[in-house]
Amino acid sequence: MDLGAAALIGAGIAAGAAALGASIGNGNVISKTIEGIARQPEAKGSLQGVMFIGVGLIEALPLITVVIAFMLFGKA
């Protein structure tokens, strides 16, 4: 297997793993936010704000991974 093929396979695996990890992380953040709102409904606004920031930070990982994958595609 040549280096270009290995780079493409590695990029695909990395992008898939990042997407899987982000989906698990988003599920955990959202479920804990719903749990917190159920316990303290008056803190809904504060919890939602923190949740959106957390989801945004979690989603940054797959985006960075896809950018790196495209950079590897260019070298293949």
Image (cartoon, rainbow, N blue to C red):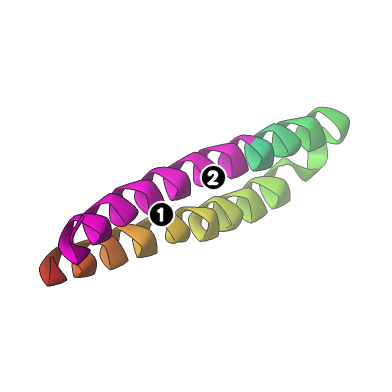
Residue indicated by mark 1:
62
Q: Quadrant of the C terminus?
A: bottom left
Residue indicated by mark 2:
21
Determine the residue positioned at 71% across, 52% down: 46
Within 10 Å of the Cα at label 1, are there few (<14), some (14-19), or many (20+) other Cα atoms? many
Q: CA distance from mark 2 to mark 1?
A: 9 Å
As for residue 13 lying within the magenta part, the answer is yes
Q: Are marks 2 and 1 in contact (CB under 8 Å)?
A: yes
Q: SS at mark 1?
A: helix
Q: Amino acid at mark 1?
A: Pro
Q: Position of residue 11 (x, y in %)?
A: 30, 56
Q: Is residue 6 above or below residue 74?
A: above
Principal secondary structure, stretch drawn in magenta: helix
Q: Name the residue furthest right.
A: 39
Residue range of the region highlighted in magenta in the rendering = 1-27
Determine the residue positioned at 61% across, 44% down: 25
